[in-house]
Image (tube, helix red, strand yellow):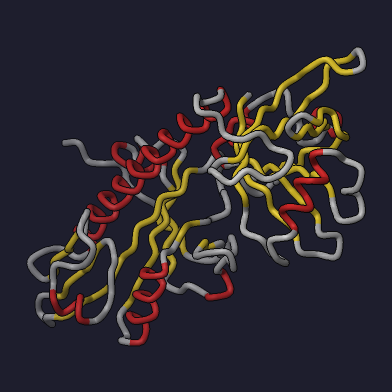
Amino acid sequence: MNVSGSLHLYSGDDKELFFVFDDVVAQDMYRDSKFNIDDLETRRVYISVGSSRFIHQRTLSFSRKQTEIKVSLCSRNTKDGLGSLTALYDWFTRHGVRPAPFGVLGRLAKVRHNGIFVWELTLTEPEDLITPPGLARRRKTMSRERRSFEHRREIQLRDLTVPGGRAEELALRILREDFPAPNYTCLWRKQFLDSERIEIRKMGIIADIDVWDVTANAPERFIEAKAQKIIGVRAKPIFHLSSAEWRSYLNAKAKGVTYEIWLFQYCDAEDLKSAPQSVTLIIFDEVSKDWLDPEGYLIAPPSAAGRRRKLRKIDKS
């Protein structure tokens, strides 16, 4: 299996270096029956870096709350004498107390070692142009790992675009029922950068949908639609909020206008279009700064936050 992920340094006393699999790879691994979350032996892997093979054996860590899989490569106390892994650790930790995650490509495969078949995770090359010690330089012709990575990225970009648009369309359909014409107008921003109403642009607010109160000649509320692919029921909500959306939420709140995040959790993107009753809608009318990830605008609210709304089947009559 060709894999991709990123190096992360956990800033505790041990300064532990982790490889975290990209989410799209992790989802495939969760579905692979060869891995058993409850069986430690199925999750043991040998770490190889560049030309240094079978450096030592570690254990894949599968999160039970979300599709995250990571493996500890080494720490400050264990990194010496590990060949290419030592060089990689020393290079990465020189970039500050909390260096930015660094993208890496590799392979995960069952191979024969000491007479038995074992899992081997091989970190082969960097995702981008900077090549740290221990890893091979990017080749002029794409490696199998890079071809797989580029293919996954192309699919991921497509999947992010399609569900996002369908989530906005579904939100628009619901809002038009909740706030019917002629008393209200629901304005979909669609591909434009900001609202079609100058009054809202002057407020410094952007949202996917503006609900305009025609009688009061003022905004009634703003809706930002998000889509989250899940693999099971009651999945923990998580979504990205850009800095502009965060500022818009604060501006709306300061002006006394509701700004809601509508998170549509789906298993199949087609459900957003044709089977909304299979989609979970969680509405957040409050967003806490405590939910923000320090590395960016990743919102991870508590599971109990927000309110759930049951969606109806589409009337096809």
Which of 7/172 is in front? Answer: 7
Q: Position of residue 252 (x, y in %)?
A: 32, 80
* Rendering coords of residue 110 (x, y %): 75, 19
Rendered position, 258 above or below 87: below
Residue at the (53%, 56%) spot, across then down? 237
Write the residue at 13% across / 76% down.
Answer: 198
Q: Quadrant of residue 41?
A: top right
Question: Is 129 left, or right, of 165 in this rendering?
Answer: right
Residue 26 in sight here? no
Q: Position of residue 11 (x, y in %)?
A: 76, 64
Q: Quadrant of the C terminus?
A: top left
Q: Is residue 220 above or below residue 242?
A: below
Q: Quadrant of residue 39?
A: top right
Query: In the rendered image, is residue 248 in sight?
Result: yes
Q: Depth check: 302 or 27 in front?
A: 27
Q: Is residue 115 left or right of residue 129?
A: right
Residue lying at 43% horizontally and 63% vertically, measured from the top left: 241
Q: Please state which of residues 286 and 181 is positioned toward the viewer in this rendering.
A: 286
Say if 230 sits above or below 44 in the image.
below
**Residue 245, quarter of the rendered image:** bottom left
- Quarter placement of the N terminus: top right
Tag count: 0
Left or right placement of residue 262 versus residue 181 in this view: right
Q: Residue 258: x and y, percent? A: 33, 76
Point out the residue furthest to the top here: 115
